[in-house]
Amino acid sequence: MNADFDTYRLSDEHEALREAVRALAEKEIAPYAAEVDEQGRYPVEARDALVKAGFHAITIPEEYGGEGADELAGCIVIEEVARACASSSLIPGVNGLGLTPILLSASHELKQQVLPSIASGEAMISYALSEREAGSDAASMKTRARRDGDEWVLNGTKCWITNAGESTWYTVMAVTDPEKKANGISAFVVHKDDPGFEVGPKERKLGINGSPTREIYFSDCRIPADRIIGAEGTGFKTALQTLDHTRPTIGAQAVGIAQGALDVAISYVKERKQFGKHLAEFQGLQFMIADMAMKVEAARQLVYVATSRAERGEANLGFISSAAKCMASDVAMSVTTDAVQLLGGAGYTKDFPVERMMRDAKITQIYEGTNQVQRLVMARALLR
Ligand code: COS
Protein backbone atom coordinates (compact mmCIF):
# COMPACT_ATOMS: atom_id res chain seq x y z
CA MET A 1 0.00 0.00 0.00
CA ASN A 2 2.39 2.67 -1.19
CA ALA A 3 1.27 6.25 -1.56
CA ASP A 4 1.74 6.04 -5.32
CA PHE A 5 -0.74 8.33 -7.00
CA ASP A 6 0.35 7.56 -10.54
CA THR A 7 -0.77 3.96 -10.43
CA TYR A 8 -2.74 3.89 -13.67
CA ARG A 9 -3.52 6.01 -16.64
CA LEU A 10 -6.19 5.41 -19.23
CA SER A 11 -4.43 5.31 -22.59
CA ASP A 12 -6.00 6.51 -25.83
CA GLU A 13 -6.64 2.83 -26.58
CA HIS A 14 -8.57 2.42 -23.31
CA GLU A 15 -10.69 5.49 -24.11
CA ALA A 16 -11.33 4.21 -27.64
CA LEU A 17 -12.26 0.82 -26.22
CA ARG A 18 -14.75 2.46 -23.85
CA GLU A 19 -16.38 4.33 -26.72
CA ALA A 20 -16.58 1.18 -28.84
CA VAL A 21 -18.08 -0.95 -26.05
CA ARG A 22 -20.53 1.80 -25.08
CA ALA A 23 -21.73 2.12 -28.67
CA LEU A 24 -22.12 -1.64 -28.99
CA ALA A 25 -23.90 -1.92 -25.63
CA GLU A 26 -26.35 0.88 -26.43
CA LYS A 27 -27.18 -0.51 -29.85
CA GLU A 28 -27.05 -4.26 -29.38
CA ILE A 29 -27.45 -4.99 -25.66
CA ALA A 30 -29.59 -2.29 -23.99
CA PRO A 31 -32.66 -2.87 -26.22
CA TYR A 32 -32.97 -6.45 -24.90
CA ALA A 33 -32.05 -5.86 -21.24
CA ALA A 34 -35.60 -5.54 -19.86
CA GLU A 35 -36.84 -8.54 -21.85
CA VAL A 36 -33.86 -10.67 -20.82
CA ASP A 37 -34.61 -9.82 -17.18
CA GLU A 38 -38.35 -10.41 -17.36
CA GLN A 39 -38.12 -13.65 -19.31
CA GLY A 40 -35.07 -14.86 -17.42
CA ARG A 41 -33.43 -15.79 -20.69
CA TYR A 42 -29.77 -15.88 -21.66
CA PRO A 43 -28.79 -12.71 -23.57
CA VAL A 44 -27.87 -14.35 -26.87
CA GLU A 45 -27.87 -10.97 -28.66
CA ALA A 46 -25.24 -9.69 -26.23
CA ARG A 47 -23.19 -12.88 -26.52
CA ASP A 48 -23.18 -12.73 -30.32
CA ALA A 49 -22.34 -9.02 -30.40
CA LEU A 50 -19.57 -9.37 -27.80
CA VAL A 51 -18.04 -12.38 -29.57
CA LYS A 52 -18.19 -10.66 -32.95
CA ALA A 53 -16.37 -7.62 -31.56
CA GLY A 54 -13.86 -9.75 -29.61
CA PHE A 55 -15.00 -8.30 -26.25
CA HIS A 56 -16.18 -11.55 -24.59
CA ALA A 57 -12.78 -12.60 -23.19
CA ILE A 58 -10.46 -9.77 -24.05
CA THR A 59 -7.59 -10.67 -21.71
CA ILE A 60 -6.64 -13.97 -23.39
CA PRO A 61 -3.09 -13.52 -24.73
CA GLU A 62 -2.56 -13.34 -28.49
CA GLU A 63 -0.47 -16.48 -28.27
CA TYR A 64 -3.69 -18.39 -27.48
CA GLY A 65 -5.81 -16.67 -30.10
CA GLY A 66 -7.00 -13.80 -27.89
CA GLU A 67 -6.89 -10.02 -27.98
CA GLY A 68 -4.06 -9.76 -25.45
CA ALA A 69 -5.68 -6.80 -23.68
CA ASP A 70 -4.73 -5.81 -20.14
CA GLU A 71 -6.93 -6.23 -17.03
CA LEU A 72 -7.90 -2.54 -17.07
CA ALA A 73 -9.33 -3.07 -20.56
CA GLY A 74 -11.19 -6.11 -19.22
CA CYS A 75 -12.73 -3.91 -16.51
CA ILE A 76 -13.75 -1.22 -19.01
CA VAL A 77 -15.58 -3.81 -21.13
CA ILE A 78 -17.44 -5.18 -18.10
CA GLU A 79 -18.28 -1.69 -16.81
CA GLU A 80 -19.71 -0.49 -20.11
CA VAL A 81 -21.74 -3.64 -20.72
CA ALA A 82 -23.06 -3.52 -17.13
CA ARG A 83 -24.18 0.09 -17.65
CA ALA A 84 -26.69 -1.34 -20.14
CA CYS A 85 -27.31 -4.86 -18.81
CA ALA A 86 -25.70 -6.49 -15.76
CA SER A 87 -26.67 -10.00 -16.89
CA SER A 88 -24.82 -9.49 -20.17
CA SER A 89 -21.74 -8.15 -18.37
CA LEU A 90 -21.40 -11.59 -16.80
CA ILE A 91 -20.40 -12.96 -20.22
CA PRO A 92 -16.99 -11.21 -20.17
CA GLY A 93 -17.02 -11.22 -16.34
CA VAL A 94 -17.40 -14.96 -15.85
CA ASN A 95 -15.12 -15.83 -18.73
CA GLY A 96 -12.49 -13.74 -16.96
CA LEU A 97 -13.13 -15.51 -13.67
CA GLY A 98 -13.02 -18.99 -15.20
CA LEU A 99 -9.92 -18.44 -17.27
CA THR A 100 -7.79 -16.49 -14.80
CA PRO A 101 -6.76 -19.64 -12.84
CA ILE A 102 -5.59 -21.08 -16.17
CA LEU A 103 -3.68 -17.92 -17.11
CA LEU A 104 -2.07 -17.79 -13.66
CA SER A 105 -1.16 -21.41 -13.07
CA ALA A 106 -1.84 -23.85 -15.93
CA SER A 107 0.81 -25.45 -18.14
CA HIS A 108 1.32 -24.17 -21.67
CA GLU A 109 -0.25 -27.41 -22.97
CA LEU A 110 -3.42 -26.97 -20.91
CA LYS A 111 -3.67 -23.32 -21.98
CA GLN A 112 -3.40 -24.50 -25.58
CA GLN A 113 -6.17 -27.05 -25.01
CA VAL A 114 -8.65 -24.63 -23.49
CA LEU A 115 -8.00 -20.96 -24.27
CA PRO A 116 -8.28 -20.85 -28.11
CA SER A 117 -11.85 -22.18 -27.99
CA ILE A 118 -12.79 -19.42 -25.54
CA ALA A 119 -10.93 -16.76 -27.52
CA SER A 120 -12.86 -17.68 -30.67
CA GLY A 121 -16.17 -17.51 -28.79
CA GLU A 122 -16.95 -21.14 -29.58
CA ALA A 123 -16.77 -21.91 -25.83
CA MET A 124 -17.36 -20.05 -22.56
CA ILE A 125 -15.93 -20.94 -19.14
CA SER A 126 -17.31 -20.86 -15.58
CA TYR A 127 -15.63 -20.98 -12.16
CA ALA A 128 -16.63 -23.53 -9.56
CA LEU A 129 -15.37 -22.94 -6.02
CA SER A 130 -18.46 -22.68 -3.79
CA GLU A 131 -20.53 -25.50 -2.37
CA ARG A 132 -23.83 -25.42 -0.51
CA GLU A 133 -21.97 -25.76 2.84
CA ALA A 134 -18.73 -24.08 1.75
CA GLY A 135 -19.48 -20.50 0.69
CA SER A 136 -17.43 -17.94 2.63
CA ASP A 137 -15.49 -20.84 4.18
CA ALA A 138 -14.40 -22.04 0.76
CA ALA A 139 -11.59 -24.27 2.08
CA SER A 140 -14.13 -26.54 3.78
CA MET A 141 -15.28 -27.88 0.39
CA LYS A 142 -16.12 -31.59 0.09
CA THR A 143 -15.90 -32.22 -3.67
CA ARG A 144 -13.19 -34.87 -4.11
CA ALA A 145 -10.77 -35.62 -6.92
CA ARG A 146 -8.91 -38.92 -6.84
CA ARG A 147 -6.15 -40.00 -9.21
CA ASP A 148 -6.83 -43.21 -11.13
CA GLY A 149 -4.08 -44.06 -13.62
CA ASP A 150 -4.13 -41.47 -16.38
CA GLU A 151 -7.28 -39.83 -15.12
CA TRP A 152 -8.74 -37.81 -12.26
CA VAL A 153 -12.12 -38.93 -10.94
CA LEU A 154 -14.30 -36.17 -9.47
CA ASN A 155 -17.24 -36.59 -7.09
CA GLY A 156 -19.36 -33.89 -5.46
CA THR A 157 -21.59 -30.89 -6.08
CA LYS A 158 -20.66 -27.26 -6.72
CA CYS A 159 -23.20 -24.53 -6.14
CA TRP A 160 -24.17 -21.02 -7.42
CA ILE A 161 -22.20 -21.51 -10.62
CA THR A 162 -22.73 -18.50 -12.85
CA ASN A 163 -23.47 -19.30 -16.51
CA ALA A 164 -23.53 -23.04 -15.77
CA GLY A 165 -25.25 -24.81 -18.64
CA GLU A 166 -24.08 -22.11 -21.09
CA SER A 167 -20.39 -22.76 -20.49
CA THR A 168 -18.40 -25.49 -22.19
CA TRP A 169 -15.51 -25.42 -19.71
CA TYR A 170 -15.53 -25.30 -15.89
CA THR A 171 -12.60 -24.48 -13.64
CA VAL A 172 -13.25 -26.66 -10.61
CA MET A 173 -11.59 -26.73 -7.19
CA ALA A 174 -11.65 -30.13 -5.46
CA VAL A 175 -10.00 -31.85 -2.49
CA THR A 176 -7.17 -34.17 -3.46
CA ASP A 177 -5.78 -34.65 0.07
CA PRO A 178 -8.27 -34.09 2.93
CA GLU A 179 -5.48 -34.24 5.55
CA LYS A 180 -3.87 -31.07 4.22
CA LYS A 181 -6.99 -28.82 4.33
CA ALA A 182 -6.43 -25.70 2.13
CA ASN A 183 -3.14 -27.16 0.87
CA GLY A 184 -4.91 -30.37 -0.14
CA ILE A 185 -7.13 -28.66 -2.72
CA SER A 186 -6.35 -28.80 -6.43
CA ALA A 187 -7.81 -27.03 -9.47
CA PHE A 188 -9.01 -28.78 -12.64
CA VAL A 189 -10.61 -27.95 -15.95
CA VAL A 190 -13.73 -29.98 -16.75
CA HIS A 191 -15.51 -30.08 -20.12
CA LYS A 192 -19.30 -30.23 -20.28
CA ASP A 193 -19.10 -33.51 -22.23
CA ASP A 194 -16.85 -35.26 -19.73
CA PRO A 195 -18.58 -38.45 -18.51
CA GLY A 196 -20.22 -37.99 -15.10
CA PHE A 197 -20.70 -34.21 -15.42
CA GLU A 198 -24.19 -32.71 -15.21
CA VAL A 199 -25.80 -29.34 -14.58
CA GLY A 200 -28.79 -28.79 -12.28
CA PRO A 201 -31.91 -26.64 -12.62
CA LYS A 202 -31.71 -22.83 -12.75
CA GLU A 203 -31.86 -20.99 -9.42
CA ARG A 204 -34.77 -18.53 -9.15
CA LYS A 205 -33.15 -15.20 -8.27
CA LEU A 206 -33.80 -11.58 -7.32
CA GLY A 207 -31.69 -10.19 -10.17
CA ILE A 208 -29.17 -10.93 -12.93
CA ASN A 209 -32.00 -13.02 -14.33
CA GLY A 210 -30.42 -13.27 -17.77
CA SER A 211 -27.45 -15.15 -16.38
CA PRO A 212 -28.20 -18.74 -15.39
CA THR A 213 -26.99 -19.87 -11.96
CA ARG A 214 -27.01 -23.62 -11.31
CA GLU A 215 -25.47 -26.41 -9.33
CA ILE A 216 -23.08 -28.69 -11.17
CA TYR A 217 -22.72 -32.38 -10.32
CA PHE A 218 -19.78 -34.73 -10.59
CA SER A 219 -20.58 -38.44 -10.37
CA ASP A 220 -17.41 -40.42 -10.98
CA CYS A 221 -16.61 -37.73 -13.52
CA ARG A 222 -13.44 -38.77 -15.35
CA ILE A 223 -11.06 -36.23 -16.86
CA PRO A 224 -7.57 -36.71 -18.34
CA ALA A 225 -4.71 -36.32 -15.82
CA ASP A 226 -3.29 -33.32 -17.68
CA ARG A 227 -6.39 -31.22 -16.94
CA ILE A 228 -5.03 -30.33 -13.49
CA ILE A 229 -4.15 -26.62 -13.20
CA GLY A 230 -0.62 -26.38 -11.79
CA ALA A 231 0.68 -28.78 -9.16
CA GLU A 232 -1.48 -30.93 -6.91
CA GLY A 233 -2.35 -29.08 -3.69
CA THR A 234 -2.02 -25.57 -5.17
CA GLY A 235 -5.67 -25.17 -6.19
CA PHE A 236 -6.87 -23.11 -3.22
CA LYS A 237 -4.04 -20.63 -3.58
CA THR A 238 -4.75 -20.37 -7.31
CA ALA A 239 -8.43 -19.81 -6.48
CA LEU A 240 -7.67 -16.97 -4.03
CA GLN A 241 -5.01 -15.45 -6.26
CA THR A 242 -7.63 -15.48 -9.03
CA LEU A 243 -10.03 -13.55 -6.82
CA ASP A 244 -7.31 -10.95 -6.21
CA HIS A 245 -7.45 -10.30 -9.98
CA THR A 246 -11.18 -10.68 -10.54
CA ARG A 247 -12.72 -8.90 -7.53
CA PRO A 248 -11.91 -5.56 -9.22
CA THR A 249 -13.91 -6.81 -12.23
CA ILE A 250 -16.95 -7.19 -9.97
CA GLY A 251 -16.19 -3.65 -8.84
CA ALA A 252 -16.24 -2.65 -12.52
CA GLN A 253 -19.59 -4.35 -12.97
CA ALA A 254 -20.93 -2.50 -9.93
CA VAL A 255 -19.62 0.85 -11.23
CA GLY A 256 -21.30 0.17 -14.57
CA ILE A 257 -24.65 -0.66 -12.97
CA ALA A 258 -24.42 2.47 -10.80
CA GLN A 259 -23.49 4.68 -13.76
CA GLY A 260 -26.41 3.29 -15.74
CA ALA A 261 -28.83 4.15 -12.91
CA LEU A 262 -27.29 7.61 -12.44
CA ASP A 263 -27.63 8.39 -16.15
CA VAL A 264 -31.33 7.44 -16.10
CA ALA A 265 -31.92 9.50 -12.94
CA ILE A 266 -30.20 12.58 -14.41
CA SER A 267 -32.29 12.57 -17.57
CA TYR A 268 -35.46 11.96 -15.54
CA VAL A 269 -34.97 14.89 -13.15
CA LYS A 270 -34.30 17.18 -16.12
CA GLU A 271 -37.60 16.18 -17.74
CA ARG A 272 -40.08 15.71 -14.90
CA LYS A 273 -41.90 18.72 -13.47
CA GLN A 274 -43.60 19.06 -10.09
CA PHE A 275 -44.70 22.25 -8.33
CA GLY A 276 -44.17 24.01 -11.67
CA LYS A 277 -40.43 23.28 -11.79
CA HIS A 278 -38.16 20.56 -13.14
CA LEU A 279 -37.06 18.15 -10.40
CA ALA A 280 -33.48 19.14 -11.31
CA GLU A 281 -34.16 22.61 -9.90
CA PHE A 282 -34.80 21.32 -6.35
CA GLN A 283 -31.62 21.63 -4.33
CA GLY A 284 -32.41 18.57 -2.22
CA LEU A 285 -32.44 16.45 -5.35
CA GLN A 286 -29.39 18.21 -6.81
CA PHE A 287 -27.45 17.19 -3.71
CA MET A 288 -28.59 13.59 -4.14
CA ILE A 289 -27.37 13.57 -7.76
CA ALA A 290 -24.04 15.14 -6.74
CA ASP A 291 -23.50 12.52 -4.01
CA MET A 292 -24.38 9.68 -6.37
CA ALA A 293 -21.93 10.87 -9.02
CA MET A 294 -19.20 11.48 -6.43
CA LYS A 295 -19.51 7.93 -5.12
CA VAL A 296 -19.53 6.39 -8.58
CA GLU A 297 -16.38 8.27 -9.57
CA ALA A 298 -14.58 7.34 -6.34
CA ALA A 299 -15.48 3.68 -6.84
CA ARG A 300 -14.34 3.79 -10.47
CA GLN A 301 -10.94 5.22 -9.50
CA LEU A 302 -10.44 2.54 -6.83
CA VAL A 303 -11.37 -0.21 -9.30
CA TYR A 304 -8.93 1.09 -11.91
CA VAL A 305 -6.10 1.35 -9.38
CA ALA A 306 -6.79 -2.17 -8.07
CA THR A 307 -6.93 -3.75 -11.50
CA SER A 308 -3.79 -1.93 -12.62
CA ARG A 309 -1.90 -3.19 -9.57
CA ALA A 310 -3.12 -6.71 -10.31
CA GLU A 311 -2.04 -6.34 -13.94
CA ARG A 312 1.46 -5.40 -12.78
CA GLY A 313 1.56 -8.55 -10.66
CA GLU A 314 2.15 -6.63 -7.44
CA ALA A 315 2.30 -8.66 -4.23
CA ASN A 316 -0.30 -8.37 -1.47
CA LEU A 317 -3.24 -7.48 -3.67
CA GLY A 318 -5.73 -8.64 -1.04
CA PHE A 319 -6.40 -5.22 0.47
CA ILE A 320 -6.81 -3.22 -2.72
CA SER A 321 -8.82 -5.77 -4.69
CA SER A 322 -11.21 -6.42 -1.79
CA ALA A 323 -11.52 -2.68 -1.15
CA ALA A 324 -12.40 -2.05 -4.81
CA LYS A 325 -15.02 -4.79 -4.92
CA CYS A 326 -16.51 -3.90 -1.56
CA MET A 327 -16.70 -0.17 -2.07
CA ALA A 328 -17.96 -0.31 -5.64
CA SER A 329 -20.69 -2.80 -4.79
CA ASP A 330 -21.83 -0.79 -1.75
CA VAL A 331 -21.89 2.28 -4.00
CA ALA A 332 -23.91 0.41 -6.64
CA MET A 333 -26.50 -0.59 -4.04
CA SER A 334 -26.83 2.92 -2.65
CA VAL A 335 -26.81 4.72 -6.02
CA THR A 336 -29.38 2.39 -7.63
CA THR A 337 -31.61 2.72 -4.56
CA ASP A 338 -31.37 6.52 -4.79
CA ALA A 339 -32.11 6.35 -8.52
CA VAL A 340 -35.34 4.48 -7.78
CA GLN A 341 -36.12 7.16 -5.18
CA LEU A 342 -35.54 10.00 -7.65
CA LEU A 343 -37.92 8.42 -10.14
CA GLY A 344 -40.50 7.93 -7.37
CA GLY A 345 -43.48 5.75 -8.29
CA ALA A 346 -42.20 5.45 -11.85
CA GLY A 347 -38.89 4.15 -10.56
CA TYR A 348 -40.64 1.33 -8.77
CA THR A 349 -42.24 0.08 -12.01
CA LYS A 350 -40.76 -1.94 -14.84
CA ASP A 351 -41.39 0.98 -17.22
CA PHE A 352 -37.94 2.24 -16.23
CA PRO A 353 -34.69 0.24 -15.85
CA VAL A 354 -33.71 1.48 -12.39
CA GLU A 355 -35.64 -1.16 -10.40
CA ARG A 356 -33.82 -3.86 -12.41
CA MET A 357 -30.51 -2.12 -11.78
CA MET A 358 -31.26 -2.01 -8.05
CA ARG A 359 -32.03 -5.75 -8.02
CA ASP A 360 -28.95 -6.50 -10.13
CA ALA A 361 -26.71 -4.36 -7.89
CA LYS A 362 -27.51 -6.50 -4.84
CA ILE A 363 -25.56 -9.53 -6.05
CA THR A 364 -22.36 -7.50 -6.37
CA GLN A 365 -22.32 -7.22 -2.56
CA ILE A 366 -22.57 -11.00 -2.31
CA TYR A 367 -20.70 -12.89 -5.02
CA GLU A 368 -16.94 -13.33 -5.39
CA GLY A 369 -16.95 -13.10 -1.62
CA THR A 370 -19.54 -11.29 0.48
CA ASN A 371 -18.61 -7.77 1.52
CA GLN A 372 -18.11 -9.17 5.03
CA VAL A 373 -15.42 -11.49 3.60
CA GLN A 374 -13.89 -8.50 1.75
CA ARG A 375 -13.66 -6.62 5.05
CA LEU A 376 -12.10 -9.69 6.65
CA VAL A 377 -9.46 -9.85 3.89
CA MET A 378 -8.78 -6.10 4.27
CA ALA A 379 -8.53 -6.34 8.06
CA ARG A 380 -6.16 -9.31 7.85
CA ALA A 381 -3.91 -7.34 5.49
CA LEU A 382 -3.94 -4.32 7.81
CA LEU A 383 -3.41 -6.19 11.06
CA ARG A 384 -0.95 -8.82 9.85
N1 COS B 1 -3.33 -15.59 -2.86
C1 COS B 1 -2.61 -16.73 -2.74
N2 COS B 1 -2.65 -17.48 -1.60
C2 COS B 1 -3.42 -17.05 -0.60
C3 COS B 1 -4.18 -15.86 -0.67
C4 COS B 1 -4.10 -15.12 -1.86
N3 COS B 1 -4.79 -13.98 -2.01
N4 COS B 1 -4.84 -15.70 0.49
C5 COS B 1 -4.52 -16.74 1.27
N5 COS B 1 -3.65 -17.57 0.61
C6 COS B 1 -3.05 -18.81 1.10
C7 COS B 1 -2.64 -18.69 2.55
O1 COS B 1 -1.31 -18.20 2.66
C8 COS B 1 -2.75 -20.11 3.04
O2 COS B 1 -1.64 -20.88 2.63
P1 COS B 1 -0.55 -21.45 3.71
O3 COS B 1 -1.36 -22.32 4.65
O4 COS B 1 0.42 -22.21 2.88
O5 COS B 1 0.00 -20.22 4.38
C9 COS B 1 -3.95 -20.65 2.25
O6 COS B 1 -4.06 -19.83 1.07
C10 COS B 1 -5.23 -20.61 3.02
O7 COS B 1 -5.42 -19.26 3.41
P2 COS B 1 -6.26 -18.84 4.71
O8 COS B 1 -5.82 -19.66 5.87
O9 COS B 1 -6.22 -17.37 4.80
O10 COS B 1 -7.71 -19.35 4.25
P3 COS B 1 -9.10 -19.30 5.01
O11 COS B 1 -9.68 -20.65 4.99
O12 COS B 1 -8.95 -18.57 6.30
O13 COS B 1 -9.99 -18.43 3.99
C11 COS B 1 -10.96 -16.47 3.05
C12 COS B 1 -9.71 -17.15 3.65
C13 COS B 1 -12.14 -16.43 4.00
C14 COS B 1 -10.50 -15.05 2.72
C15 COS B 1 -11.35 -17.20 1.74
O14 COS B 1 -11.87 -18.48 2.02
C16 COS B 1 -12.35 -16.45 0.90
O15 COS B 1 -12.00 -15.54 0.15
N6 COS B 1 -13.64 -16.83 1.03
C17 COS B 1 -14.68 -16.33 0.16
C18 COS B 1 -14.72 -17.18 -1.03
C19 COS B 1 -15.36 -16.50 -2.15
O16 COS B 1 -14.99 -15.41 -2.54
N7 COS B 1 -16.32 -17.19 -2.71
C20 COS B 1 -16.99 -16.72 -3.85
C21 COS B 1 -16.80 -17.74 -4.89
S1 COS B 1 -16.45 -17.10 -6.43
S2 COS B 1 -18.22 -16.48 -7.06
Image (cartoon, rainbow, N blue to C red):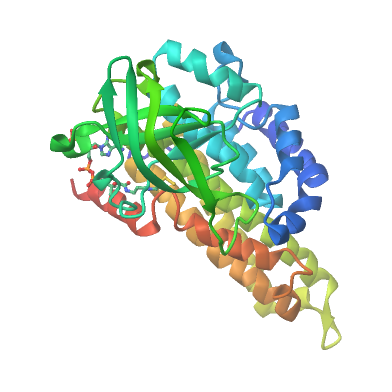
Of 341 and 121, nearer the camera is 121
Q: Is residue 306 visible?
A: no
Q: Report which quarter residue 262 is drawn in.
A: bottom right
Q: Compared to 152, does 172 lie above or below?
A: below
- In the picture, measured across the screen, residue 364 lies left or right of residue 78, that is left
The x, y position of residue 294, in whole percent, is 58, 59
Which residue lies at the image location 72% right of the left edge and 31% below the top edge? 16
Whereabouts is ligand 1, in terms of quadrant? Answer: top left
Residue lying furthest bottom: 275
Q: Compared to 268, does 235 lie above or below?
A: above
Residue lying furthest left: 179
- Quadrant location of the N terminus in the rendered image: top left
- In the picture, measured across the screen, residue 378 lies left or right of residue 99, that is left
Which residue lies at the image location 48% right of the left edge and 61% below the top edge? 330
The x, y position of residue 281, in whole percent, is 77, 76
The x, y position of residue 340, in whole percent, is 66, 72
- In the picture, measured across the screen, residue 142 lies left or right of residue 167, that is left
- Quadrant location of the C terminus in the rendered image: top left
- In the picture, measured across the screen, residue 46 lies left or right of residue 319, that is right
Which residue lies at the image location 43% right of the left edge and 35% below the top edge? 245
Q: Compared to 293, does 93 lie above or below?
A: above
Of 228 and 148, nearer the camera is 148
Q: Is residue 285 visible?
A: yes
Which residue lies at the image location 79% right of the left edge and 40% below the top edge? 23
The x, y position of residue 357, in whole percent, is 64, 61
